[in-house]
Protein backbone atom coordinates (compact mmCIF):
# COMPACT_ATOMS: atom_id res chain seq x y z
CA UNK A 1 0.00 0.00 0.00
CA UNK A 2 1.54 3.38 -1.01
CA UNK A 3 2.28 5.59 1.96
CA UNK A 4 0.79 8.60 0.15
CA UNK A 5 -2.57 6.83 0.12
CA UNK A 6 -2.54 6.80 3.93
CA UNK A 7 -1.82 10.55 3.91
CA UNK A 8 -4.43 11.54 1.33
CA UNK A 9 -7.74 12.93 2.66
CA UNK A 10 -10.83 10.78 2.21
CA UNK A 11 -12.99 11.59 -0.82
CA UNK A 12 -16.28 13.46 -0.43
CA UNK A 13 -19.04 11.41 1.14
CA UNK A 14 -20.95 9.42 -1.48
CA UNK A 15 -24.76 9.46 -1.59
CA UNK A 16 -26.21 7.22 1.10
CA UNK A 17 -27.56 3.82 0.03
CA UNK A 18 -31.18 2.95 0.69
CA UNK A 19 -31.55 2.81 4.50
CA UNK A 20 -33.29 -0.57 4.41
CA UNK A 21 -30.59 -2.19 2.27
CA UNK A 22 -27.83 -4.28 3.76
CA UNK A 23 -25.24 -1.58 3.04
CA UNK A 24 -27.60 1.09 4.36
CA UNK A 25 -28.02 -0.69 7.69
CA UNK A 26 -24.26 -0.75 8.15
CA UNK A 27 -24.00 2.97 7.32
CA UNK A 28 -26.78 3.73 9.79
CA UNK A 29 -24.96 1.75 12.48
CA UNK A 30 -21.78 3.81 11.85
CA UNK A 31 -23.81 7.00 12.24
CA UNK A 32 -25.30 5.77 15.51
CA UNK A 33 -21.82 4.92 16.77
CA UNK A 34 -20.67 8.44 15.91
CA UNK A 35 -23.61 9.81 17.89
CA UNK A 36 -22.67 7.65 20.88
CA UNK A 37 -18.99 8.62 20.80
CA UNK A 38 -19.82 12.29 20.35
CA UNK A 39 -22.33 12.22 23.19
CA UNK A 40 -19.94 10.31 25.44
CA UNK A 41 -17.23 12.93 24.88
CA UNK A 42 -19.57 15.81 25.66
CA UNK A 43 -20.82 14.13 28.85
CA UNK A 44 -17.39 12.98 30.08
CA UNK A 45 -16.07 16.17 31.75
CA UNK A 46 -19.38 16.95 33.46
CA UNK A 47 -19.80 13.36 34.65
CA UNK A 48 -16.29 13.26 36.10
CA UNK A 49 -16.58 16.56 37.95
CA UNK A 50 -20.13 16.44 39.24
CA UNK A 51 -20.56 12.71 39.88
CA UNK A 52 -17.23 12.64 41.67
CA UNK A 53 -18.43 15.50 43.85
CA UNK A 54 -22.03 14.32 44.30
CA UNK A 55 -21.52 10.57 44.69
CA UNK A 56 -18.15 10.45 46.41
CA UNK A 57 -17.85 13.93 47.98
CA UNK A 58 -14.31 14.09 46.67
CA UNK A 59 -12.08 17.15 47.04
CA UNK A 60 -10.76 19.34 45.55
CA UNK A 61 -13.68 20.46 43.41
CA UNK A 62 -12.83 20.51 40.62
CA UNK A 63 -9.61 18.57 40.25
CA UNK A 64 -6.85 20.13 38.17
CA UNK A 65 -7.41 18.00 35.05
CA UNK A 66 -9.66 15.33 33.57
CA UNK A 67 -6.79 12.86 33.87
CA UNK A 68 -6.60 13.53 37.63
CA UNK A 69 -9.95 11.77 37.98
CA UNK A 70 -8.04 8.53 37.47
CA UNK A 71 -7.33 8.77 41.20
CA UNK A 72 -10.95 9.48 42.14
CA UNK A 73 -14.11 7.46 42.61
CA UNK A 74 -14.77 8.08 38.91
CA UNK A 75 -11.71 6.12 37.77
CA UNK A 76 -13.74 3.40 36.09
CA UNK A 77 -15.84 5.94 34.16
CA UNK A 78 -12.71 7.74 33.01
CA UNK A 79 -10.98 4.55 31.88
CA UNK A 80 -14.09 3.11 30.22
CA UNK A 81 -14.86 6.35 28.35
CA UNK A 82 -11.33 6.73 26.98
CA UNK A 83 -11.05 3.04 26.17
CA UNK A 84 -14.40 2.95 24.38
CA UNK A 85 -13.51 6.04 22.36
CA UNK A 86 -10.09 4.63 21.51
CA UNK A 87 -11.29 1.23 20.31
CA UNK A 88 -14.04 2.88 18.28
CA UNK A 89 -11.61 5.27 16.57
CA UNK A 90 -9.35 2.35 15.67
CA UNK A 91 -11.99 -0.07 14.46
CA UNK A 92 -14.88 1.78 12.91
CA UNK A 93 -13.30 2.31 9.46
CA UNK A 94 -10.09 0.35 9.79
CA UNK A 95 -10.32 -1.07 6.26
CA UNK A 96 -10.09 2.39 4.65
CA UNK A 97 -6.74 3.80 3.52
CA UNK A 98 -6.75 7.58 3.82
CA UNK A 99 -5.53 10.39 6.06
CA UNK A 100 -8.83 10.53 7.96
CA UNK A 101 -8.54 6.91 9.02
CA UNK A 102 -4.79 7.15 9.69
CA UNK A 103 -5.45 9.96 12.16
CA UNK A 104 -8.42 8.11 13.62
CA UNK A 105 -6.31 5.01 14.30
CA UNK A 106 -3.46 7.10 15.72
CA UNK A 107 -5.86 9.03 17.95
CA UNK A 108 -7.51 5.80 19.03
CA UNK A 109 -4.24 4.25 20.16
CA UNK A 110 -3.40 7.42 22.08
CA UNK A 111 -6.84 7.44 23.72
CA UNK A 112 -6.16 3.94 25.03
CA UNK A 113 -2.69 4.92 26.26
CA UNK A 114 -4.00 7.91 28.25
CA UNK A 115 -5.64 5.84 31.05
CA UNK A 116 -3.21 2.94 30.61
CA UNK A 117 -0.34 5.32 31.40
CA UNK A 118 -2.01 7.62 33.97
CA UNK A 119 -0.90 11.06 34.99
CA UNK A 120 1.15 11.49 38.15
CA UNK A 121 -0.29 11.98 41.61
CA UNK A 122 -0.52 15.38 43.24
CA UNK A 123 1.60 16.07 46.36
CA UNK A 124 -1.59 15.83 48.45
CA UNK A 125 -2.40 12.42 46.98
CA UNK A 126 1.14 11.22 47.70
CA UNK A 127 0.82 12.35 51.33
CA UNK A 128 -2.56 10.63 51.56
CA UNK A 129 -0.97 7.37 50.45
CA UNK A 130 -2.80 7.02 47.10
CA UNK A 131 -1.13 3.90 45.64
CA UNK A 132 0.58 3.57 42.29
CA UNK A 133 -0.63 1.02 39.78
CA UNK A 134 1.51 -1.89 38.63
CA UNK A 135 2.83 -0.13 35.55
CA UNK A 136 3.88 2.91 37.58
CA UNK A 137 5.68 0.63 40.03
CA UNK A 138 7.42 -1.13 37.14
CA UNK A 139 8.48 1.87 35.02
CA UNK A 140 8.38 4.70 37.55
CA UNK A 141 5.68 7.30 38.07
CA UNK A 142 7.52 10.01 36.12
CA UNK A 143 8.16 7.80 33.08
CA UNK A 144 4.51 6.77 32.93
CA UNK A 145 3.47 10.41 33.25
CA UNK A 146 5.67 11.42 30.30
CA UNK A 147 3.99 8.78 28.12
CA UNK A 148 0.63 10.10 29.33
CA UNK A 149 1.51 13.67 28.32
CA UNK A 150 2.80 12.59 24.90
CA UNK A 151 -0.29 10.45 24.20
CA UNK A 152 -2.58 13.29 25.32
CA UNK A 153 -0.87 15.78 23.01
CA UNK A 154 -1.01 13.51 19.96
CA UNK A 155 -4.64 12.65 20.77
CA UNK A 156 -5.65 16.32 20.87
CA UNK A 157 -3.81 17.15 17.64
CA UNK A 158 -5.35 14.15 15.86
CA UNK A 159 -8.85 15.15 16.93
CA UNK A 160 -8.35 18.70 15.74
CA UNK A 161 -7.13 17.66 12.28
CA UNK A 162 -9.99 15.16 11.94
CA UNK A 163 -12.46 18.00 12.60
CA UNK A 164 -10.79 20.00 9.81
CA UNK A 165 -11.14 17.02 7.45
CA UNK A 166 -14.80 16.64 8.45
CA UNK A 167 -15.38 20.27 7.52
CA UNK A 168 -13.52 19.88 4.25
CA UNK A 169 -15.72 16.94 3.23
CA UNK A 170 -18.96 18.55 4.36
CA UNK A 171 -18.19 21.64 2.28
CA UNK A 172 -18.25 19.69 -0.99
CA UNK A 173 -20.87 17.13 -0.09
CA UNK A 174 -24.16 16.86 -1.95
CA UNK A 175 -27.30 17.86 -0.10
CA UNK A 176 -28.35 14.91 2.04
CA UNK A 177 -31.48 16.12 3.75
CA UNK A 178 -30.11 18.45 6.39
CA UNK A 179 -32.03 21.68 6.86
CA UNK A 180 -28.79 23.67 7.09
CA UNK A 181 -26.52 24.12 4.05
CA UNK A 182 -23.15 22.48 3.52
CA UNK A 183 -21.40 25.80 4.16
CA UNK A 184 -22.77 25.85 7.71
CA UNK A 185 -21.48 22.37 8.51
CA UNK A 186 -18.09 23.18 7.00
CA UNK A 187 -17.78 26.18 9.30
CA UNK A 188 -19.17 24.20 12.23
CA UNK A 189 -16.46 21.54 12.01
CA UNK A 190 -13.79 24.18 11.35
CA UNK A 191 -14.98 26.01 14.48
CA UNK A 192 -14.67 22.79 16.50
CA UNK A 193 -11.12 22.38 15.20
CA UNK A 194 -10.40 26.01 16.08
CA UNK A 195 -11.71 25.46 19.60
CA UNK A 196 -9.38 22.47 20.01
CA UNK A 197 -6.45 24.56 18.72
CA UNK A 198 -7.21 27.44 21.09
CA UNK A 199 -7.56 24.99 23.98
CA UNK A 200 -4.20 23.46 23.10
CA UNK A 201 -2.53 26.88 23.08
CA UNK A 202 -4.22 27.68 26.40
CA UNK A 203 -2.86 24.48 27.93
CA UNK A 204 0.69 25.15 26.70
CA UNK A 205 0.54 28.79 27.77
CA UNK A 206 -0.78 28.19 31.28
CA UNK A 207 1.27 25.07 31.96
CA UNK A 208 4.64 25.98 30.46
CA UNK A 209 4.91 29.77 30.06
CA UNK A 210 2.80 31.53 32.68
CA UNK A 211 1.23 30.31 35.90
CA UNK A 212 -2.46 29.89 35.16
CA UNK A 213 -5.16 28.91 37.64
CA UNK A 214 -4.83 25.41 39.02
CA UNK A 215 -7.81 24.31 36.90
CA UNK A 216 -6.38 25.63 33.62
CA UNK A 217 -5.54 22.15 32.32
CA UNK A 218 -9.04 20.94 33.22
CA UNK A 219 -10.56 23.87 31.31
CA UNK A 220 -8.45 23.18 28.22
CA UNK A 221 -9.16 19.46 28.24
CA UNK A 222 -12.87 20.10 28.74
CA UNK A 223 -12.94 22.45 25.75
CA UNK A 224 -11.22 19.78 23.63
CA UNK A 225 -13.68 17.10 24.75
CA UNK A 226 -16.69 19.32 24.02
CA UNK A 227 -15.41 20.36 20.58
CA UNK A 228 -14.51 16.80 19.59
CA UNK A 229 -17.83 15.50 20.88
CA UNK A 230 -19.85 18.19 19.11
CA UNK A 231 -18.08 17.54 15.80
CA UNK A 232 -18.58 13.78 15.93
CA UNK A 233 -22.16 14.06 17.18
CA UNK A 234 -22.98 16.42 14.30
CA UNK A 235 -21.25 14.09 11.82
CA UNK A 236 -23.56 11.28 12.91
CA UNK A 237 -26.73 13.34 13.28
CA UNK A 238 -28.37 12.40 9.99
CA UNK A 239 -31.36 11.50 12.09
CA UNK A 240 -33.91 10.99 9.35
CA UNK A 241 -31.60 8.55 7.62
CA UNK A 242 -30.69 6.87 10.91
CA UNK A 243 -34.38 6.22 11.53
CA UNK A 244 -34.90 4.74 8.08
CA UNK A 245 -35.93 7.63 5.83
CA UNK A 246 -34.12 7.82 2.49
CA UNK A 247 -31.73 10.77 2.40
CA UNK A 248 -33.19 12.01 -0.89
CA UNK A 249 -36.63 12.34 0.72
CA UNK A 250 -35.50 14.65 3.49
CA UNK A 251 -35.57 17.95 1.58
Image (cartoon, helix red, strand yellow):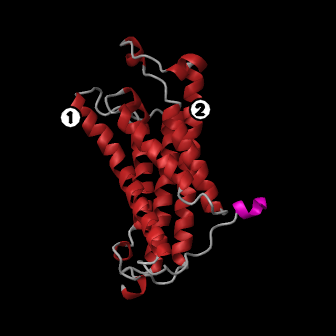
Mark 2 vs mark 1: which is more N-terminal? 1
Say which of 47 and 83 sits in front.
83
Residue for badge 2: 147
Residue 200 location in percent, x, y?
Answer: 51, 47
Q: In this view, does 192 lie above or below 178?
A: above
Q: In this view, does 162 lie to the left or right of 249?
A: right
Q: Quadrant of the C terminus?
A: bottom left
Distance from disc 2 to disc 1, alpha carbons, whole Å, reads 31 Å
Q: Is residue 48 magenta?
A: no
Q: In this view, does 103 lie above or below 110?
A: below
Say which of 200 and 44 sits in front.
44
Q: In which quarter of the image is the N terminus?
A: bottom right
**Measuring 55% from the left and 35% from the top, which residue is drawn there?**
149
Q: The magenta stretch spans which residues?
A: 1-7
User: How many residues crowd around disc 1 within 10 Å: few (fewer than 14), some, or many (20 or more)?
Assistant: few
Residue extending farthest right: 2
**Measuring 47% from the left and 65% from the top, which residue is drawn there?**
189
Picture disc at residue 54: 1
Residue 135 location in percent, x, y?
Answer: 55, 22
**Measuring 55% from the left and 48% from the top, which residue is drawn there?**
108
**Measuring 48% from the left and 74% from the top, which residue is drawn there?**
22
Say which of 232 and 28 sits in front.
28
Residue 139: quadrant of the picture: top right
Q: In this view, does 143 lie above or below 9?
A: above
Amino acid sequence: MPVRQLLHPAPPTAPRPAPASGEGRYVRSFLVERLIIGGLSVVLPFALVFLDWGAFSERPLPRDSLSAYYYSGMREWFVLSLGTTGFFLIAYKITESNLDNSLSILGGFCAILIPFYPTGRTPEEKLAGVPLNSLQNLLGEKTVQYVHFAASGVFIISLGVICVLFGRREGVRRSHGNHLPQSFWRLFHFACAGMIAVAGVWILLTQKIVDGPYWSLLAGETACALAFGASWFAKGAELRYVFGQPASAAN
